[in-house]
Image: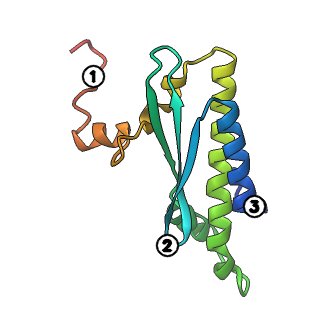
Amino acid sequence: MIKNYTSGVPVDRTMAKIESALVRGGAINIMKDYQDGMVNAVCFFVQEPKTGKRLAIRLPVNVEAVHQILQSKIKRPRPGTLNKLKEQAARTAWKLVQDWVEVQLSLIEMQQVEFLQVFLPYVWDGKRTFYNVLKDNGFKMLTDGKGS
């Protein structure tokens, strides 16, 4: 089941809700990255509560991937459906990010996790996220779970 695949909420309204949630969660600066005139990531700074270190976080979306998946689910599209699908993919992708951010911030607020436990993969050095650094290095920092 694909959550939010029928969302009619405009991307700008969803982005406003994401920004509002991030501010409540401690964001001190929020920016958006654009590609081809569409937002493809929301970036923000937070001050890590335990160390006081200022961290950049980059939450990307892959609208094209959502578009491809939605398109694959349509057996016999009605006239005009495929033309509207790219906008639907953007609404769906950002709505999923909104849901994820709100749930993660709730877990943090309820002291179920720490901020870095959930946002660490998205810590950004200006070029790559921490996840991308690990991936580019073949995940060598990760163990096999056997203590080696």
Q: Residue at x 25, y 27 (%)?
A: 141
Residue, disc 2: 36
Q: Are marks 1 and 3 in contact (CB under 8 Å)?
A: no
* Distance Cα–Cα, label 1 vs label 3: 40 Å
Q: Under tag 2, what secondary structure?
A: loop
Give the answer, above or below, for where 72 lies relative to 123. below
Q: Earlier in the sequence, mark 2 or mark 3?
A: 3
- At label 3, counting other C-alpha atoms closer than 10 Å, the crowd grade (few under 14, some 14-19, many 20 or more) is few
Q: Are marks 2 and 3 in contact (CB under 8 Å)?
A: no
In the rendered image, the quadrant that contains the C terminus is top left
Q: Amino acid at mark 1?
A: Asp
Numbered label attached to residue 144: 1
Nearer to the camera, 12 or 110: 12
Q: Earlier in the sequence, mark 1 or mark 3?
A: 3
Q: Residue at x 66, y 58 (%)?
A: 92
Point out the residue furthest to the right here.
8
Q: Amino acid at mark 3?
A: Thr
Q: Are marks 1 and 2 in contact (CB under 8 Å)?
A: no
Residue, disc 3: 6
* Distance Cα–Cα, label 1 vs label 2: 40 Å
Instruction: Mark 1 vs mark 2: give the one in front.
Output: 2
Left or right for 109, reference 54 = right
Q: Amino acid at mark 2?
A: Asp
Specify whether residue 135 is in view: yes
- At label 2, counting other C-alpha atoms closer than 10 Å, the crowd grade (few under 14, some 14-19, many 20 or more) is few
Give the answer, above or below, for where 63 lies relative to 102. below
Q: Under tag 1, what secondary structure?
A: loop
